[in-house]
Amino acid sequence: MSRPGWYPDPYGTGSLRWWDGRTWTDHLNPEPPRGAGPPRRRQPYGPQGWGRPAVPALDATVRGLLLHADEQAVAYGNASLAWPHVEWVAYWAAHLPSGYGHGSGVQWIFQVGRHPFQGGPRVEVVLEPATAQVGDPEQIWLRLVELCRAQAEARLTAELAGRVRAGESIDVAQGLTVHPGGVRGNRVSLSWSAISGATVENGRVWIQQSSGSSPVLYVPQQNPNAVLIPELLSRLKG
């Protein structure tokens, strides 16, 4: 963690919270209105149905900016979002070709936000080996993904599945429509009985047919909520 100072409150109050160099304090800026009682941090949200133990909080410095994530929120630089406010997630590893004075490598990207496809607020963290930061970039990324899965993905998947069961057709991952009868995208339509499942591989989410071994439909993994597709299809088929 970086030096003491005022940072966006990772607990989602909308104020700044004082970091004393070791932990978040109860001091907010601006302070709550008089009579509201002392500022208190909310109790952490527990795991939401994924059968995972509590994930330790993450503190790191990436590109000179403070990164903090725990069971309540994720904050990076001047951007922060409480997990209950997250409406879309995306994370992937991109292989960078050599050139422009650097060798080949891997870039790890993590994004969460509100209002998918509408340019809403987001938190985006880009990690790579050449970036000056405290901690191993891949391990930081994996911790972010683990917290996201525990605190946001189960809720989002349940909400999307509920909408489809209620009769809605929803756009998932900007290119895949999931509806009560199955899925369609890229001029391919599949009924639920024709779908065997979905897997994430090589930067894409592949949807597989029951009648064949080769997937017939995919969406890029970096699209909003694409990583939810395997669990979403599993819930709706079950």
Image (tube, helix red, strand yellow):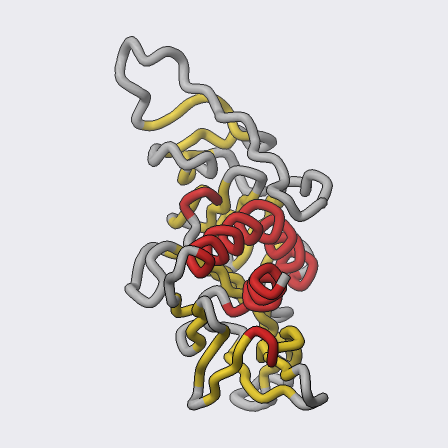
Residue 64 position (above or below residue 230): above
Q: Front-most of 175 and 23? A: 175
Left of 126 or right of it: where is 238? right
> What residue is rendered at 52% in x and 48% in y?
155
Using the image as rendered, state which of residue 186 and residue 32 is in the foreground.
186
- Choose top left, top right, bottom left or bottom right for residue 113: bottom left
Percent position of residue 156, x then y: 49, 53
Residue 102, horizontal then vertical, whole percent: 59, 84
| In the foreground, 44 or 226 | 226
Q: Nearer the viewer, residue 188 or 174?
A: 188
The residue at the point 59 percent across, 57 percent down is 133
Q: For the point 48% across and 25% down, which residue is it?
A: 41
Residue 211 visible to the viewer = yes
Quadrant where the image shows the C terminus: bottom right
Residue 95, image x, y percentages = 61, 81
Q: Is residue 127 visible?
A: no
Q: How many marks?
A: 0
